[in-house]
């Protein structure tokens, strides 16, 4: 101060402070960038796991679609072979009668005439339940890590929420319970003294098993229910196709960052 160099020293001090501040800001920026990159890598991993579950769901839904379509056409065939040829009417909510896949459960087309081997095979699948839960492990892990809240693609989040809602609504767990048409048909046959395997031993399964009006009514119920299930499985597959594509694009975007 005595030599009049105060301004010079103040400028020097301020310059040093600015350099320190700039250094700190750069360090913080680099740290934030590293943390963001690490978080993006973790989110990408979670999305990859989610994609794995989505593809697993898709395979399961394709199997459900085929299973229920087979039950629909089998029930119609059995009723027709038993002389019940009136038009089968399903509720509008069930949708159209689903197409039967060429590689379905029977491994070929529905027979045009009476075919005991097909009748036996048809009954065997009409007395079985096929329930598949959606895979939710990856989504649960995604949420539990807290990374799901940091995932910013709201469109994918909305579609995921709607997908699981439709899945659980279309395939509720009670469909395999005591009140399901499949279980009721099985119990009806048991009450008549026929076990699951007795269908193979009967000379004329249709005449015996469909002489009971209750069994005929249950077949008609299965037609309506399985029509709905098959169409809903198809809808869910379409939803998954859209979701899978968007998740794949999102993973690619994270890879570029």
Image: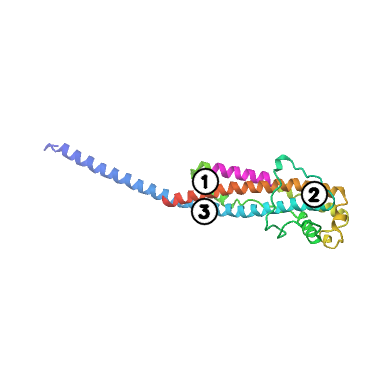
**Mark 2 against mark 3, which lies toward the viewer?**
2
Provide the secondary structure element on which disc 1 rests: helix
Q: Nearer the viewer, residue 216 or 11?
A: 216
Residue at image location 79% in from the left, 47% down from the top = 220
Left or right for 250, reference 74: left
Disc 2 crowd rating (10 Å Cα; few below 14, some 14-19, many 20+) is many
Q: Nearer the viewer, residue 241 or 101?
A: 101
Mark 1 or mark 3: name the one nearer the start of the chain.
3
Whether residue 201 appears in magenta in the rendering, the answer is: no
Q: Residue furthest bottom?
A: 201
Disc 3 crowd rating (10 Å Cα; few below 14, some 14-19, many 20+) is some
| Magenta extent | 156-171
Q: Count the marks: how many?
A: 3
Q: Nearer the viewer, residue 89 or 59?
A: 89
Query: Which mark identifies residue 219?
Result: 2
Q: What residue is shown with label 1?
A: 148
Q: Residue furthest front?
A: 112
Provide the secondary structure element on which disc 2 rests: helix
Image marks 2 and 3: residues in contact by CB distance under 8 Å: no
Mark 1 or mark 2: name the one nearer the start of the chain.
1
The colour scheme used here is: rainbow
């Amino acid at each position: 101060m005595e030599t009049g160099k105060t301004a010079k020293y103040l400028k020097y001090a301020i310059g040093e402070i600015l350099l320190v501040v700039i250094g700190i800001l750069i360090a913080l920026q680099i740290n934030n960038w590293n943390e963001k990159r690490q978080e993006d890598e973790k989110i990408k991993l979670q999305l990859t796991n989610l994609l794995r579950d989505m593809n697993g769901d898709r395979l399961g839904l394709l199997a459900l679609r085929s299973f229920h379509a087979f039950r629909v056409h089998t029930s119609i065939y059995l009723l027709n072979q038993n002389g019940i040829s009136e038009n089968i009417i399903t509720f509008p909510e069930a949708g159209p009668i689903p197409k039967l896949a060429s590689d379905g459960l029977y491994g070929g087309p529905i027979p045009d005439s009476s075919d005991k081997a097909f009748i036996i095979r048809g009954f065997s699948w009409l007395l079985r339940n096929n329930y598949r839960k959606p895979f939710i492990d990856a989504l649960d892990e995604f949420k539990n890590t807290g990374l799901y809240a940091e995932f910013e693609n709201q469109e994918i989040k909305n579609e995921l929420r709607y997908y699981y809602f439709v899945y659980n609504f279309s395939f509720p767990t009670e469909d395999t319970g005591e009140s399901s048409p499949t279980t009721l048909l099985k119990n009806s046959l048991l009450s008549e003294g026929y076990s699951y395997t007795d269908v193979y031993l009967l000379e004329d399964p249709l005449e015996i098993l469909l002489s009971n009006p209750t069994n005929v009514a249950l077949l008609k119920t299965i037609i309506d229910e399985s029509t709905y299930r098959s169409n809903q499985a198809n809808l869910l597959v379409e939803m998954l196709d859209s979701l899978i594509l968007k998740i794949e694009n999102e993973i690619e975007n994270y890879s570029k960052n």
